[in-house]
Every structure is written in structure tokens, then in C-alpha cells.
Amino acid sequence: MRAGFAEIDVTPPPGGFLAGFPSRTEGSQAVDDPLYLRVAALEDDAGERVVLVTSDLLKWPRDLSWRTKLWAERELGVPSAALILNTSHTHSAPALFLQPCYPHWGLDREYLCRVEQAIRDGIARALGDLQPTEVRFGVGAAHFGVNRRIPRPDGPAAMGPNEDAWYDPELPVFVFQREDEPVAVLYSYACHPTSKNTLHVSADWPGQISQGLKAELGAGVMTLFAQGAGGSIMPRMSLTQGAEEYARYWREVARGIADFARSDAMQPIELAVHAAEREFGIPYDPTKLPAMDALLALADPRDTELPMNVRPANRSIVRLWAQDMLERTRTGTLPAAFRMHVTRWRLAEGLQLIGMSGEVTAEVGRAIKDLFPNERTVFLGYCSYTDAYIPTAAMLPEGGHEALASMYFHERPAPFVPEIDAIIAREVRALAGQ
């Protein structure tokens, strides 16, 4: 079996707008640490290949993802299902597409073209680097994520650390070795990279861990991070707790990952690759579609009453959403469902990787892994595109950002139907041939 790798710096110059936090009203002022695209290409002994693109970016544009898949298939012979594009979802990276809810965030189209070309170059370089490589795999644990949903009996769920709610401690690790020396480490974890809210470009905590892993394993070791089901998880440590403590904390996390990567828990695997993908729709709840009078009230240019789940600071976002929904209602173009994309890679006997579009909540990621009790599943969210939170059915009546308020940011007309759990389970099972 063979593997190949590529790394390309895609750090933007200061001055452009950083996506992720609505409060930002001016461009970036400096660069804390670089942003990278990192690519891993894997090939089994039968010649079957898969390619994973990881990135220190917030969101992929849908058209860029599909265009990249089409290009890779035609130019490099990589089938669409064999290519996964994942973002770390750092909130300190440039926007890659115009978002109507943030009209003040300009789009640097030259930078966007640079990123798209970097993806193509990275895929081609990783395939060109394919060499005999030993692959070792293990599942460690980390606890730097904490659930950020706080259900309330008298209103919608609030956002903040909730120590009583569930988070996913699993931290899958792949180590790639040539001549008994590590050349690359790929790890995944489910947690929002929101530990910084400044006007500085940054890979956030994945960048801190990358630096720590290189210090532990060697500067020449490539460090790839793939985001898991982090939609409902926030980091325990933030920059507001002090720069020195911040750096120390993430260095300790990196040391723990490195120790696990060097441990006997990592076992060699024989790649036996198969890739499949499918698209499906999750309908919006038609009973929750806003009436025309409600949309007119929300679109009012005056500061009128807000829905319960919306903070006053987001008044302009709700207004823009309502104006857009009014026009779509008038023209009969309201979408009936959110188009989802899911990929399944069989990597080895008893080991699979499932990648799904959207900001998948940790609870959904756990439910998908529970569908396969006899198979080790590495689950990735934030693949291909990220323009909706994917909650569980239990979250819908609780409200909150992941279940309800995010629809104002993502141009969705209503919450998802209560059957969302069953729909996702059915489609994932079908993809796995169950």
C-alpha cells in the first residue's frame, strides 16, 4: 500500500474580512499563524485510491466543492466518491463566498482563485508523492471540547459550556511511516475552532496543536486535522484566559496526542479501499414556515420585536433573512429540503470513514457511529459544504442556535422535520449497503 502527502500555505494577507463572528466590522489586522491546505492520498494494493483534503478554513462554497470533484475525476482519474474536502471550521479565516446575512464581509476573489488552485495542486502533488507507507491506526481520547447547548424550560436553548451534556471524547489517529519513521499524522476531533475572536488570521486551536505535534514528532512530520461532528461543541480553553495559559494548554493537548501516536495502542492496518457517496434531502417542516404577515414584520426596517431565539445584535441578520424569504415566497422558489451529501470510505477490515456535509452536531455524529456496532467508524462533519447545522430531532423543540436560530444565517426557510433522525439513519445505512 502507498500514501502521498502535500501541504500548501494559503494564508491571506492582512486586510481582508475574516468570517465566523458577526461582530466583525473591519478587515483583519495581522496573522497569528499560517493557514494550510494539507492533502493525504491513500492507495491499497489493488490500486484503489482515496484523497482527503484538510484545510484551515471556515466553509467550502458548494460550487467549488463540486467543481473540484469534477476536475479531479476528469484530470486525475479520482472518482467523486474518492475525494473528501474537509474544513477545520476555524473562525479566523477569510470568507470564501458571499453570505447575504453578512453583507459587510467582502469577498477577495483573487484569494478564492488562489485557494481553488491550491486544492488542485495539493491533490496532484499528493498523488505524485505516492510511496510505500505503513499505516497505523488507533482511537485515543481528548476532553478539551464541551457541549455548548444549555436547554431551558422557559425559552430556547442558550449557548454556553454545559458540563452536564454529552461531547464525543474519541480522537482517531492515523500515523503514516516510511522506513519506521513518521512522515505524517492525521487526527480528528469534534470541536468548534472558536477559541479566538480577534481580527488576526489564525488556524485557531488546530494550528496550536499542529505546532505542538511538530515539536513532539519532528518538524518534517506533516500534521493533518479533520473536523468531526463539532457543531454543538466548543473548546474549554480560549484566548481570553491569557496568551500564556492558552499556549500552554494546547501544547499539553498536542503532547497527549503525540504520546498516543507513539504508543502500542496504534496498530498497523492493511488498506482495502472502497468509496461510495450519495445525496439526499432533509425536508424543512412545512408547519413551521412563517406566514406572510410574520415575514413582513421581521423585514420591517424599524427595530421591531424579535423571535425568542434571536439576540438583539443579530437584528439585521433576521431582517435580511425575512426580506429574502419574502421574495422567495413571491417567486415560488422557497426550497423544500436541504440537500445533504454523505461519503463512506471502507479503509480496512472493520474500519470505515463517513464524511457528511453541514455543521453536524456531536449528537448526530454519535448516532451515526451507533449504526455500526461491529465496525470502527471515523466520522467527519464539515465536508463539501457547511451551509446548515444538522441537529437531532430532540433538539428541535429545544430551539437554540443549532436547531433554529442558525436558519437565519444559512438562508433556510424553516427548521427541519421531526423525522430528521430516521432520514439520516436510512440514508447512511443505504450507503453502507444495509
Image: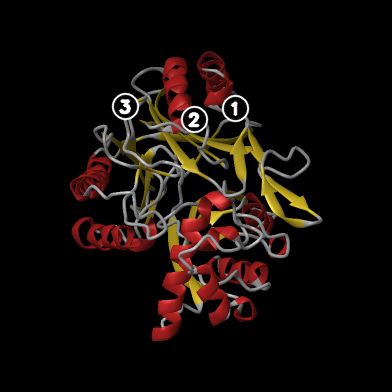
Asked whether 399 or 145 is in front, the reply is 399
The residue at the point 33 percent across, 29 percent down is 34
Place of residue 35 in the rendered image (x, y in percent of width and height, measured from the top left): 33, 34
Reply above or below: 105 against 177. Answer: below
Q: Distance between the residues labelled 1 and 3?
A: 22 Å
Q: How far apart are marks 2 and 3 (CA)?
A: 17 Å
The residue at the point 58 percent across, 80 percent down is 291
Between tags 2 and 1, which lies in front?
1
Q: Mark 3 points at which residue?
A: 30
Q: Earlier in the sequence, mark 2 or mark 3?
A: 3
The residue at the point 60 percent across, 81 percent down is 286
The disc label shown at residue 151, or none = none
Marks 2 and 1: CB-CB under 8 Å? yes
Asked whether 243 or 247 is in front, the reply is 243
Q: Mark 2 points at which residue?
A: 205
Tell me which amino acid carries mark 3. Answer: Ala
Tell me which amino acid carries mark 2. Answer: Trp
- Crowd around label 1: few <14 · some 14–19 · many ≥20 (10 Å): many
Q: In this view, does 112 lie to the left or right of 233?
A: left
Marks 1 and 3: CB-CB under 8 Å? no
Q: Which of marks 1 and 3 is nearer the N terminus?
A: 3
Place of residue 423 in the rendered image (x, y in percent of width and height, measured from the top left): 61, 72
Place of residue 358 in the rendered image (x, y in percent of width and height, measured from the top left): 49, 58
- Crowd around label 2: few <14 · some 14–19 · many ≥20 (10 Å): many
